[in-house]
Amino acid sequence: MNTVIILSYLLIFGGIVIWCLLLPSGKKVPHSIVEGITTFGGAFLLASCFINLVPHMYASGFYTPDTHIKLGMAVLIGFIIQMLLEWLTSGVEHGHNHCQECHDDDATEDHHSEHQQHHFHPITGLLVGLSIHAFLEGMPLVDSDGQLHQSLLYGIVLHNIPLALVLITLFIHNGFSTAKSFALLSLFAIMTPLGSLCNLLLLPPNETLQSFIMGIVVGILLHVSVSILFDRETNNKWLKLLLIVAAFAAAYFTPGCPEIYPG
């Protein structure tokens, strides 16, 4: 495994867990900054899908006669997978938290006690859902020939910043210690590199299989990016438009898909 891939894994991991050190004692990052990073990251993911990831997915063709698979179906499967995951994550992938049970201060002590007796803690479900999401999106990060998808890497790093902020805020709000928060955030951070390693080491380098995996991830990222860009209102529409255009330009100039865009 070459140095670039290892550094990429460290970038993903470090880009998440560093927030555990930057947000002590419940300190919050200004909402406008989080909103800007989330919008830019969502737009970058959307553009990367169409500019780099989809062309790579279809590099071997739209249909494989030997397996009778229409590769576009993988995108729809990924879209459905992300819909199912959001039952657990409550939309944290969009950069904000909709999980009322995770931070509802008005809930009574008796209700909280009853909830703990009969259900797992909502943050547990949230972490499980996010971990599956991170694992899947990391699988096609590196091709079987060692080619790193830079657009996917940068999109994941940008996407993980608001995710990490939401998670660490929830941990602090629920009274988790710094050590426990760091451990849980590290568990989430390791899932994307783990997904990539599992694909490289355990799955066969079959072109159809790898294209199908990429298609599933494209479906997941399309769902997330569209939700980020259109599932929220903003007071400054011109700034949002500027961030989106800047993200599209950044994705366009990010190297990717050498099969389609040879250097």
Image (spheres, rainbow, N blue to C red):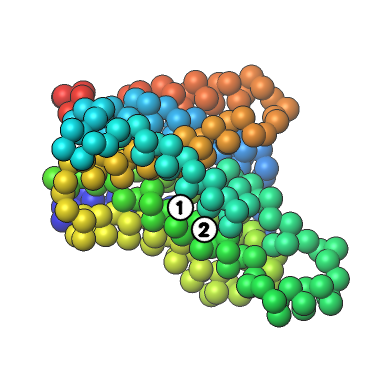
Relative to residue 134, is residue 214 depicted above or below? above
Picture residue at 33% right of the left edge, 56% below the top = 195
The answer to whether the residue labelled 1 contacts the one labelled 2, judged by CB atoms less than 8 Å apart, is yes
Relative to residue 182, is residue 7 depicted above or below? above
Q: Is residue 102 left or right of residue 198?
A: right
Picture residue at 37% right of the left edge, 26% below the top = 50
In the picture, the disc for residue 129 is 2
In the picture, the disc for residue 143 is none
Picture residue at 20% right of the left edge, 33% below the top = 64
Q: Which picture quadrant has residue 117?
A: bottom right
Picture coordinates of residue 104, whole percent (x, y): 78, 61
Q: Quadrant of the C terminus?
A: top left
SS for tag 1?
A: helix
Res. 137 in view = yes
Q: Which picture quadrant has residue 132?
A: bottom left
Picture residue at 29% right of the left edge, 54% below the top = 196
Relative to residue 129, is residue 54 depicted above or below? above
Picture coordinates of residue 33, whole percent (x, y): 61, 40
Q: Looking at the picture, tell me which residue is in the foreground, 233 or 139.
A: 139
Picture coordinates of residue 94, whole percent (x, y): 58, 43
Relative to residue 55, is residue 30 depicted above or below? below
Amino acid at dot 2: Gly
SS for tag 2?
A: helix
Amino acid at dot 1: His
Q: Is residue 76 left or right of residue 215?
A: right
In the picture, the disc for residue 133 is 1
Picture coordinates of residue 140, whole percent (x, y): 29, 46
Q: Quadrant of the N terminus?
A: bottom left
Q: Looking at the picture, tell me which residue is in the foreground, 245 or 107.
A: 107
- Gap in Å between the C-alphas at discs 1 and 2? 6 Å
Res. 256 in view = no
